[in-house]
Image (spheres, helix red, strand yellow):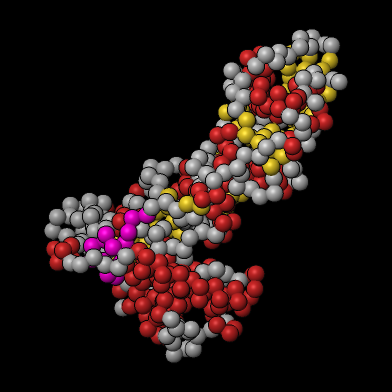
């Protein structure tokens, strides 16, 4: 036998493709060559494989070994191909039976001592293997927790190369190996989120947060430092409904690409909360990087909250890059060879001070900013971004009376109303359109609300119609105001918005500017 084959997975974003790893021996000058469009990390695999094999008393012969990763035109990124390359070579030299390794996917990086080390992206790799019909997958033991989350596939953990080789020689085919089990009681988890009752006062801001959570609306909080903007944002994840299992799997798959794993055998059902620093680069925000295209903050916040504190301090190109994912729910990073698309359906929450020094509120007696500086600061949140923010509210400084008053409603009480409002919206939009419906009001297309059976009477929409005619609202803003009005009606238990709901939606969108 001079040819050994096994399988691996090549990832492009969250999508994986089955790769056949072929190892061929010849009598030419000794060497170990790797072909099949590997990146820099993958090209170094021959050195790691040879050292690991020698450390495990499985020395490779002094012959020419050519390893091909097929299809050769698909880019191969990372060190996760090491284990598959080693097993293919061991099959070629008849150290392990070829028939037992041919249909098995191997994922893992090899250490020079033969240990099998964890790699990023195991969860989407195992999902791709299951979709391709593979039944057995070998993964590093440190990645077992996330790999076992995929149904319909047998996952075999391994700690070193020698252990795996002995299993193939003495333990029969992988289908007969014992499958590692995880404690079922630890399968579902939920991280702790601060409670909304800890926020002092801010009745109007609390209403805005509840409306935003109930309808999946984007939110802007403006106010002086210390007024509670960050506290409010940090508690939004606690009033959002828990993720469904398939949603939690999708969120964990994105985290897996970044090297995070379900180390505690848990699948977190709490929506993500991501708060990047205002110095974040464009690649850190939307994804990118040289070589492997990694997901950015907009993707790690998928199905959760993306909070930009001190939003005007973010770079303009970073803020403007949010426009595509806000509209489409996905972000596409283009490269010369290919493009990668990551999901990015997040709820955007922005926080901003009234001016650069933060004291430009009330009578602004302590403000040291010039009118030009204040104008330039406000202009950093450009019109195209603000036009996509459904709810905009001012968070005033907390007074002594508000700070010493009784605690407000807890997150549990608000979350109950949010869940009820989302259930009403789901019944209306999905119930009327089936699978093509929308889960929250914030995703409903504008024309659905302006024409047809869901169009509101002119007497109800008079205020928002007038704002559109006066140029105080764009058509996009008009649609978003209607969505907020529907959410307010759902929270109040009404089947159709009233004129008061439209008025509150206008106030929550642009405050006194439109109301005037």
Residue 226 image point, x, y percent: 23, 55
Across and down, in percent, residue 309 comes to 35, 52
Residue at the image position 47 percent from the left and 56 percent from the top: 271
Compared across the picture, whether 93 is left or right of 184 comes to: right
| Residue 171 visible somewhere in the drawing | yes
Quarter of the N terminus within the rendering? top right
Q: Residue at x 46, y 59 (%)?
A: 347
Q: Quadrant of residue 433?
A: bottom right
Residue 194 lies in the magenta stretch: yes
Residue 416 sits inside the magenta stretch: no
Residue 475 % position (x, y): 49, 73
Q: Residue at x 48, y 84 (%)?
A: 496
The quadrant in which the C terminus is found is: bottom left
In this rendering, position of residue 118 left or right of residue 134: left
Q: Residue at x 81, y 27 (%)?
A: 98
Of 282 and 61, the residue lying toward us: 61
Relative to 145, does residue 197 appear above or below in the rendering?
below
| 459 or 348: nearer the viewer | 348
State the residue lying farthest toward the right: 1
Q: Position of residue 286 (x, y in %)?
A: 51, 47
Q: Nearer the viewer, residue 358 or 277?
A: 277
Determine the image quadrant of residue 461.
Answer: bottom left
Say if residue 387 shows up in the picture: no
Number of numbered markers: 0
Q: 109 or 512, which is in the foreground?
A: 109
Span colored in magenta: 193-205
């Amino acid at each position: 036998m001079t040819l050994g084959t096994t399988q691996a997975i090549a990832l492009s974003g969250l999508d994986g493709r089955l790769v056949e790893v072929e190892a061929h021996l010849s009598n030419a000058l000794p060497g170990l060559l790797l072909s099949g469009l590997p990146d820099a990390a993958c090209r170094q695999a021959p050195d790691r494989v040879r050292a690991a094999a020698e450390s495990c008393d499985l020395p490779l012969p002094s012959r020419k070994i050519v390893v091909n990763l097929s299809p050769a035109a698909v880019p191969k990124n990372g060190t996760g191909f090491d284990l598959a390359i080693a097993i293919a070579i061991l099959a070629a030299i008849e150290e392990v039976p070829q028939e037992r390794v041919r249909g098995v996917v191997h994922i893992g990086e090899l250490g020079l001592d033969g240990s099998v080390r964890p790699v990023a992206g195991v969860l989407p790799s195992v999902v791709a293997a299951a979709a391709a019909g593979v039944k057995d997958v070998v993964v590093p033991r440190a990645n077992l927790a996330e790999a076992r989350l995929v149904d319909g596939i047998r996952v075999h953990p391994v700690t070193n190369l020698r252990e795996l080789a002995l299993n193939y020689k003495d333990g029969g085919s992988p289908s007969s190996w014992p499958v590692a089990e995880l404690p079922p009681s630890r399968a579902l988890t939920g991280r702790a989120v601060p409670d909304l009752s800890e926020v002092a006062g801010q009745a109007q801001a609390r209403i805005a947060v509840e409306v935003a959570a109930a309808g999946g609306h984007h939110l802007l909080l403006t106010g002086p430092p210390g007024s509670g903007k960050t506290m409010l944002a940090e508690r939004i994840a606690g009033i959002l409904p828990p993720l469904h299992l398939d949603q939690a799997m999708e969120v964990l798959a994105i985290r897996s690409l970044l090297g995070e794993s379900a180390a505690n055998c848990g699948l977190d059902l709490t929506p993500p909360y991501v708060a990047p620093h205002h110095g974040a680069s464009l690649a850190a925000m939307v994804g990118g990087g040289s070589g492997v295209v990694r997901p950015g903050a907009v993707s790690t916040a998928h199905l959760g909250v993306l909070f930009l504190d001190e939003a005007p301090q973010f770079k303009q190109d970073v803020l403007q890059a949010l426009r595509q994912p806000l509209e489409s729910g996905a972000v596409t990073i283009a490269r010369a060879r290919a493009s990668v698309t990551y999901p990015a359906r997040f709820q955007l929450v922005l926080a901003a001070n009234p001016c650069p020094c933060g004291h430009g509120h009330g009578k602004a007696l302590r403000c040291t900013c010039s009118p030009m500086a204040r104008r330039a600061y406000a202009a950093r949140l450009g019109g195209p971004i603000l036009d996509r923010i459904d709810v905009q509210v001012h968070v005033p400084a907390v007074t002594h009376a508000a700070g010493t008053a009784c605690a407000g409603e807890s997150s549990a009480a608000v979350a109950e109303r949010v869940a009820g409002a989302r259930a009403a919206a789901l019944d209306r939009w999905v119930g009327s359109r089936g699978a093509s419906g929308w889960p929250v009001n914030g995703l409903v297309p504008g024309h659905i609300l302006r024409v047809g059976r869901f169009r509101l009477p002119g007497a109800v929409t008079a205020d928002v119609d007038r704002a559109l005619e006066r140029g105080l609202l764009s058509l996009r803003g008009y649609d978003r105001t209607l969505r907020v009005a529907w959410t307010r009606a759902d929270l109040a238990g009404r089947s159709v918005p009233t004129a008061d709901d439209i008025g509150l939606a206008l106030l929550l969108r642009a405050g006194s500017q439109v109301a005037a």
